[in-house]
Image (spheres, rainbow, N blue to C red):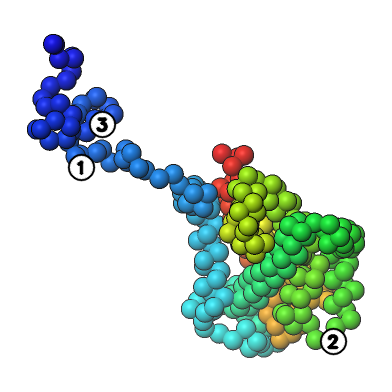
Amino acid sequence: MTEPPGMSGPAIGGPGGAMELAANEGGTLEGPGERPPGKGPTERARSLWSDAWHDLSRNPVFIIAGLLILFLVLISLWPGLIASRDPLSCGLGRSLNSSTDGHWFGFDTQGCDVYTRVVYGARTSVTVGVCSTLGVALLGSLLGGLAGFFGGVWDAILSRVTDIFFGIPIVLGGLVFLSMTGSRSVWTVVSFIVLLGWPQVARIARGSVITAKQNDYVQAARALGASNTRMMVRHILPNAVAPVIVTATIALGTYIALEATLSYLGVGLQPPTVSWGADISAASEGMQFRNAPHILLYPAAALSLTVLAFIMLGDAVRDALDPKLR
């Protein structure tokens, strides 16, 4: 009996020892432990999160935005790393002076160092943006997720409440809400943003949960007697959280711009809190920026770069987490 072409040596499983067939490029036989790298028979598929990180780590938009945001977070936590002066140390004798040695951005109307105020203004903007986003994401996800999971009367009530909140213009609501408060601190502004910002996240979370709970694995868990808490935590939440993360990441930059807008309109943060919006508002009073454009240019540029960085980060995360965009 002739041997088939391309087969030589002891038979597979024969007395000479077991041999493994490997479907590599050359079609050769390989012994145990000689698998080519990356071609193992038990290679595991990547999850949604590991696949998203794989895409993000190779996305130049995400890398640039991430580095810029990391820099903003560092100077927010430790502004003294790049600014050694006090942002509240001012002198009218140097009002509107242009840049000099040691004062790169010049001085504002009150004679304060513009560079130092721009650096310390990052702390306010990042704090408002991050805290508002966390509050909006947690409150919106909780209410929207519960309404989408249980449905019925709770879903109907949430839908009508969100419709009411969507009918309130956020800037107009800020003018009314913040003008009635005595002290307008960072936490007052954060509370206002959370109060009017949660309906958008709630509606997205509701839709994601409704879609996820109709999947076969959720129905199987329900048939096996899994509790509502287990189904929410183990099966629905991990598959419904991606749209909420994308929305919250993009909204973070919007909340920073909203704080600056409210401060510019005079109902946002009050002195001695250092804010880019307040500095832009001060530069616009009496058209002072016509004679000294630097008092408007630098805080406006810092605000624009920060908002752009967070929006770019949100776009990159959306592209990585949305399977339709692959």
Q: Which of the marked residues, 2 or 1, is nearer the chain's N terminus?
A: 1
Amino acid residing under circle 1 = Gly
Front residue of this view, candidates 12 and 66: 12
Residue 319 in the image: state x and y as whole percent.
59, 46
29 vs 165, left or right, is left
Other-residue count near label 2 (Cα within 10 Å), few / some / many at <14 / 14–19 / ≥20: few
Query: Which label lies toward us, 2 or 3?
Result: 3
The residue that disc 3 covers is: 22
Residues at marks 2 and 3 touching, judged by CB atoms closer than 8 Å: no
Q: On screen, 49 above or below 15?
A: below
Amino acid residing under circle 3 = Ala
Residue furthest toward the front?
224
Secondary element under disc 2, as helix, strand or loop, is loop
Identify the residue shown where x is 87% and y is 69%.
Answer: 173
Marker disc for residue 33: 1
286 vs 129, left or right, is right
Secondary element under disc 1, as helix, strand or loop, is loop
Front residue of this view, candidates 43 and 218: 218
The residue that disc 2 covers is: 182
Residue 290 in the image: state x and y as whole percent.
76, 67
Identify the residue shown where x is 88% and y is 67%.
Answer: 172
Q: Which of the marked residues, 2 or 3, is nearer the chain's N terminus?
A: 3
Residue 305 in the image: state x and y as whole percent.
62, 60
Marker disc for residue 279: none
- Specify the quadrant of the image occupied by residue 38: top left
Query: Which label lies toward us, 2 or 1?
Result: 1
Tally of numbered tags: 3
Q: Which of the marked residues, 1 or 3, is nearer the chain's N terminus?
A: 3
Mark 2 to mark 3: distance in Å?
75 Å
Secondary element under disc 3, as helix, strand or loop, is loop
Q: On screen, 132 above or below 247?
A: below
